Image: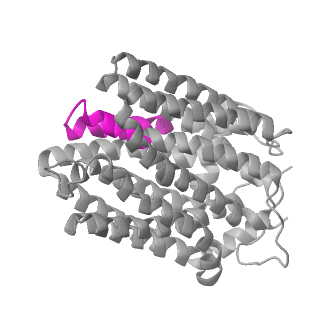
């Protein structure tokens, strides 16, 4: 049963414990994201040994996010129809098999750039179902007044596992070869599935909406209609989608700006993950700061302020490509980005009925993540024709335009009214 949400601004008198079921989900998330962190850093480093083309390297980012465009809507319906715990277990199991295939190719020396892109594409397909299941199950595991705390823990674990542990570990594993790296990620995905299967008991199938559609197509329409008509969710998704497109364009070719003797930052393959550790450290701090900052500033000022700050900090690597300066900027990006993500995720869980979380999440991420392959390809094309610096500056300009749109269309009063309507009988 999914409990009703309470307004974000109301502080409960007593905090409830997040509980053991949430701990099992969090442990599985940490293991899966440790494997993700290894793969996310390993894949572009392996690609550098196969090609030096910005466009070809950008295909890895495009392949990671393309499944959201292809499967996001359908996956949302599946998550709202099946047990959300079981969906994650199956997705993680398939992911382990995909990565094990990559390990075999790496050990035999058969890995090529097209095969690497295909592996990343298949991995991205499993991420669609695993991620939607993980975010949709949180309201089933914790009380409504702990949404921000729970989402903060999830994002902190994701960032620590991805960047603080996974990224530097990938820098070590790449020395031993792609087979070891892919094999380690496969083992972690299998362990994450096992933890969830054993440690989280019970049924986590969403209750059907009274009077709701029964057909899959009708349920897709319900999710889309809710998203399109909602005065707060719609602008948030549009702005977030543009920001995702710009960010992917920026980071799809960032490794060429940072790694190599002819790059602007002149980092080695082992130094690059260490510089990015700052993001994980900032993410941990941001996950704990999100709730107090939100309560002090309010929902929209927090979201908008952290977005603008994150975008402006992306100018540091462009104009000051010093390793220490970039590491400091990346740390601040981790803080601001995580605060904004925690607050916006908690707001979505309050505004969307529990039975629609999968479909609305799938619809929003189809647009939000579906534009990321386009962003990656645009980043590669612009970098090929106009240079890396032009790509970075264009991404920042587009991101600031998205922030301006969000500031104009959603006011704090609109958020308060939407939350009150969501919790009203």
Circle count: 0
- Look at the image and say whether residue 421 sits in the magenta stretch: no
Side of 76 where 267 appears, left or right? left
Picture quadrant of residue 110:
top left
Q: Is residue 43 visible?
A: yes
Q: Residue at x 75, y 46 (%)?
A: 24
In x, y percent, where is residue 256? Answer: 23, 47
Residue 262's place in the image compared with 297, above or below, is above
Side of 313 where 65 appears, left or right? right
In x, y percent, where is residue 289? Answer: 59, 74
Picture quadrant of residue 413:
bottom right
Residue 361's place in the image compared with 406, above or below, is above
Q: Residue at x 56, y 74 (%)?
A: 300
- Look at the image and say whether residue 58 sits in the magenta stretch: yes
Q: Is residue 359 visible?
A: no
Residue 196's place in the image compared with 280, above or below, is above
Nearer to us in this view, 323 or 58: 323
Nearer to us in this view, 161 or 332: 161
Residue 343's place in the image compared with 171, above or below, is below
Side of 330 where 78 appears, left or right? right
Q: Residue furthest bottom?
A: 296
Q: Residue at x 14, y 51 (%)?
A: 387
Nearer to us in this view, 329 or 165: 165
**Magenta stretch in the rendered image:** 40-69
Quadrant showing the C terminus: bottom right
Nearer to us in this view, 381 or 335: 335
């Amino acid at each position: 049963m999914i409990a009703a949400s309470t307004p974000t601004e109301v502080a409960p008198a007593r905090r409830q414990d997040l509980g053991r079921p949430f701990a099992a989900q969090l442990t599985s998330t940490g293991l899966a994201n440790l494997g993700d962190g290894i793969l996310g850093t390993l894949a572009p480093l392996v690609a550098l040994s196969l090609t030096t083309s910005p466009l070809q390297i950008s295909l890895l980012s495009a392949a990671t996010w393309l499944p959201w465009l292809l499967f996001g809507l359908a996956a949302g319906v599946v998550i709202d129809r099946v047990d959300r715990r079981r969906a994650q277990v199956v997705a993680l199991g398939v992911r382990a098999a995909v990565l094990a295939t990559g390990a075999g190719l790496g050990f035999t020396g058969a890995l090529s750039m097209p095969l690497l892109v295909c592996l990343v594409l298949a991995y991205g397909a499993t991420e669609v179902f695993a991620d939607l299941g993980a975010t949709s199950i949180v309201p089933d595991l914790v009380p409504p007044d702990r949404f921000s705390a729970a989402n903060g823990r999830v994002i902190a674990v994701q960032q620590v596992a991805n960047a603080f542990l996974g990224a530097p570990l990938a820098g070590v594993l790449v020395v031993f070869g792609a087979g070891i790296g892919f094999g380690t990620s496969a083992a972690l995905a299998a362990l994450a599935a096992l933890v969830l299967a054993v440690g989280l008991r019970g049924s986590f199938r969403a209750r059907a909406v009274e009077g709701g559609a029964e057909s899959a197509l009708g349920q897709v329409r319900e999710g889309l209609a809710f998203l399109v008509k909602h005065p707060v969710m719609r602008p948030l998704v549009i702005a977030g989608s543009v920001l995702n497109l710009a960010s992917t364009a920026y980071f799809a070719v960032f490794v060429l700006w940072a790694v190599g003797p002819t790059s602007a930052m002149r980092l080695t393959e082992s130094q690059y993950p260490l510089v990015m550790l700052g993001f994980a450290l900032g993410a941990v701090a941001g996950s704990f700061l999100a709730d107090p900052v939100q309560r002090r500033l309010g929902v929209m000022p927090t979201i908008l302020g952290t977005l603008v700050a994150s975008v402006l900090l992306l100018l540091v690597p462009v104009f000051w490509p010093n390793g220490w300066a970039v590491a400091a900027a990346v740390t601040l990006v981790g803080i601001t980005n995580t605060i904004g993500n925690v607050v916006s995720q908690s707001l979505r869980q309050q505004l969307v009925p529990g039975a629609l979380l999968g479909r609305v999440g799938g619809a929003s991420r189809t647009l939000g993540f579906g534009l990321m392959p386009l962003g990656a390809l645009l980043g590669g094309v612009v970098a090929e024709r106009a240079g890396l610096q032009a790509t970075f500056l264009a991404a920042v300009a587009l991101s600031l335009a998205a922030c301006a749109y969000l500031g104009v269309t959603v006011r704090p009063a609109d958020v308060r009214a939407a939350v009150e309507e969501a919790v009203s009988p």
